[in-house]
Image (tube, helix red, strand yellow):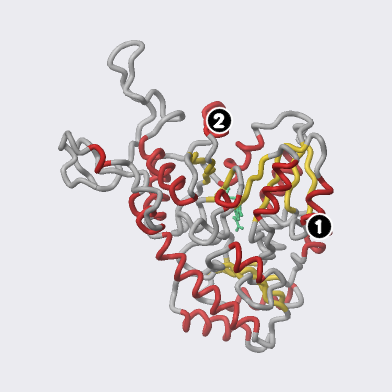
Amino acid sequence: MSHDPSTPDDSDSRQDSPPASSGFGTRAVHAGQRPDPTTGAIMPPIYQTSTYVQPELGRHLGYEYARVQNPTREALEGNLAALEGGKHGIAFASGLSAIEAVMKTLSVGDHVVSEENTYGGTNRMFNKVLSRLGIRFSFVDSRDPDQVREAIRPETKLLHMETPTNPMMRLCDLGVMAEIAHEAGALLMVDNTFATPFNQRPLEVGADVVVHSTTKYLNGHSDVIGGALVVDDDALAEELFFVRKSTGAVPGPMDAWLVLRGTKTLHVRMKAHNANGMAVARFLEGHPAVEACHYPGLASHPQHELATRQMDGFTGMVSVELGSGERAKRFVDRTHLFALAESLGGVESIIGVPALMTHASVAPDRRAFMGVTDGLVRLSVGIEDEADLLEDLDRALKGL
Ligand code: P1T
């Protein structure tokens, strides 16, 4: 990149993105951005404006109205696209609004096959909002590709997968899901929020749409609600930009800027989350108060082989079964470093009980069927020191 933004003949060295062949960390720091052409500011300015003055009627500078275009948002979109290995990033006001935008490309009577163990809010949107509007859903356990195949109908337009799932840490084989979707003439959408592109890149194995709650690891600092889609196909991108423009769920420029600041350190943070996640999972797996520990990095995880093939790291998300709601309550009330809260993916460690918190909107019998019991505790392991995290958990588990 040039240090002189005014040099006229070095446009090649001031491209918005480093080459796609550059390493993940280089793309995380630089992709989508260039020094501000007016001042040379190394950070993209926060274009806190709703509209743009046009020099004359019928001629504008590429920017008309901020629901449609915003340079700060575009910088984030370029960055996210480069991280997922897609051509187009499309930023949204939340993870749910990003998923909803994909659903708004469908029509009444269209059918979606969805993994049953998604984030509870995703399940709620499908069951309680979109079903009312005439979109049909089948919920399957996508660990078993035959269940997915059997759910396909002539009207199936989309497969919605989450891997690892929230909170059971189940996986599906993304290559197989892409094959099933494409044989059916449907698209594969993958919620990559838990894994992050540092650990898993669904587009590389055939997915058509990657969705993120950028609220989580991508932003990483628990101070923004945001979402994004990444796609490779130009026509699909155009359709999704059209939906966003027409329905309006855009992130504000400040939030886009904060997420962009977060993604600059994604690779550094994820190495720490992966390492701490593994340490916490190993500790909890061996603890006598813990009945089961769900973490794809453990050899005991039933899909560990798939995890090592499909993922480069296993994140900081760990779930444990403690046997009863009472024991779960005592545990989460006694941790200090692990804060009792919804959400995940921030630098600080968080703990919660999905049945009462993130998945309270899922019908109790469905929750029980998936293993989201009252005794299940979910941990989002942060980047604090491992010894302090283990000490906090050990103390909270004593005498359970
Ligand atoms: O909260 P929002 O940015 O709208 O993202 C929704 C969402 C989508 N996908 C996954 C996998 C998620 O985990 C979430 C949000 N999840 C939580 C708030 C949570 O604590 O699990």
Q: Amino acid at mark 2?
A: Ala
- As helix, strand or loop, the secondary structure at mark 2 comes to helix
- Residue 285 picture location, percent across and down: 65, 81
Which residue is labeled 2 in the image?
235
Which residue is labeled 1 in the image?
366
Give the quadrant of residue 41.
top left
Q: Is residue 248 visible?
A: no
Q: Between residues 271 and 53, which one lies in front from this camera angle?
A: 271
Q: Residue at x 71, y 77 (%)?
A: 292
Q: Nearer the viewer, mark 1 or mark 2?
A: 2
Report the side of 1 relative to 365 (left or right): left
Name above or below for residue 322 compared with residue 25. Answer: below
- Residue 237 picture location, percent across and down: 53, 34
Q: Is residue 352 visible?
A: yes
Q: Amino acid at mark 1?
A: Arg
- Residue 312 picture location, percent across and down: 53, 65
Q: Quadrant of the C terminus?
A: bottom right
Q: Tell me the distance, in whole angstroms, between the alpha carbons under discs 1 and 2.
A: 37 Å
- Residue 378 picture location, percent across and down: 63, 68
